[in-house]
Amino acid sequence: MIPTSFEFYPPKTDEQRDQLDRTAKKLKTHAPDYVSCTFGAGGSTLDYTPETVERLHHHHGLDAAPHISCIGGTRAELGALLTRYKAMGCRRIVALRGDLPSGMARTGDFRYATDLVEFIRREHDGFFHIEVGCYPETHPQAEHALADLKHFKAKVDAGADGAITQYFYNADAYFRFVDDVRKLGVTIPIVPGIMPISNFSQLRRFSEACGAEIPRWISKRMLAYGDDIDSIREFAADFVAALCQRLIDGGAPALHFYTLNLAKPTQSVLARLS
Ligand code: FAD
């Protein structure tokens, strides 16, 4: 079976905590390589993310990797967070720029994820395995696709050990991206980020914000099912599993699932993979 990792967001209420506990328990049966926990840029989850990482690690026995988003943060804040993660025994960090919530205008010491990767390398050389984000369909704020590739290469040169992609539903975009960055001399693993579908309207909103394209034929099929939730879930699991199978057959080194703290959509996809 291909190596997998599962991404969670940090719960803030007891109800959300219970849900994450149930999900982690179920997904643990798939023996993930590691799990990761997102971080709100600007510090909105400054305590929730470490608490969740601690819980996933000690309560669930999972290798848990914190995300760190640097935008709006100071060197001192991010340095303290890294020291905290080191003391907790975390060896893997997902290093990102992040997007400040609208209306928050916090100046920070870091402009791009490359600055954070350099900082982690400088302060903790070799201790952390550093994953970064990448965008087969181009980051929405990039000047153009080639500039985005160049910036990604700079981030890798700064010291990233691996990359996880933004989710996509077009396998060719991933294969093309991998070919393009290999030509630039990037050799680190590029792991596809997979977004199983549980709520199509929410997915449409996410996709508009992050620049992931939902192919027209998929939107049309989803619309045709109307309120027939069972058919939507079956169809979504079938086509996301077919995407995963194509990625595996084409040489993807692992799959990283954006779980949104739900077990079922990810499990439905995994159950369909050979
Ligand atoms: P960067 O690599 O810094 O790139 C951002 C933009 O700046 C790109 O358009 C790039 O081309 C451009 N750029 C980079 N360097 C330069 C330069 N020197 N000059 C000019 N332009 C430049 N967000 C969160 O807030 N919390 C999370 O936990 C989180 N987890 C994520 C996990 C994954 C796997 C992915 C793919 C994304 C995640 N995000 C998260 C979203 C991410 O923070 C946003 O996509 C953000 O807009 C970009 O982050 P980045 O680290 O890719 O940024």
Image: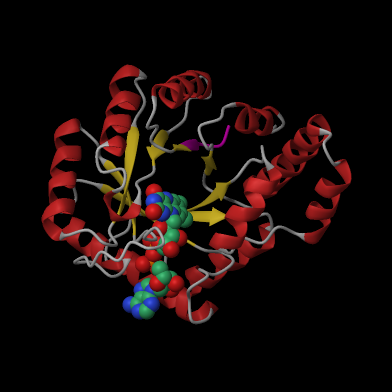
The answer to whether 13 is drawn above or below residue 79 in the figure is above
Query: In the rendered structure, does residue 2 fall within the stretch colored magenta?
Result: yes
Q: Can residue 151 be seen in this view?
A: yes
Read off the magenta span: 1-6
| Residue at image location 38% in from the left, 39% down from the top | 37
Residue 185, how many percent across, how many down? 42, 71
Query: In the rendered structure, does residue 79 fall within the stretch colored magenta?
Result: no
User: Relative to the observer, which residue lies in front, 12 or 141?
Assistant: 12
User: Relative to the observer, which residue lies in front, 258 or 199?
Assistant: 199
Q: In which quarter of the image is the C terminus?
A: top right
| Residue at image location 51% in from the left, 23% down from the top | 23
Tell me: 142 left or right of 201.
Answer: left
Q: Quadrant of the N terminus?
A: top right
Where residue 74 sits, quadrant-wise, is bottom left
| Residue at image location 31% in from the left, 43% down from the top | 45
Tell me: 211 left or right of 113.
Answer: right
User: Relative to the observer, which residue lies in front, 237 or 153?
Assistant: 237
Residue 237, how many percent across, how many down? 73, 36
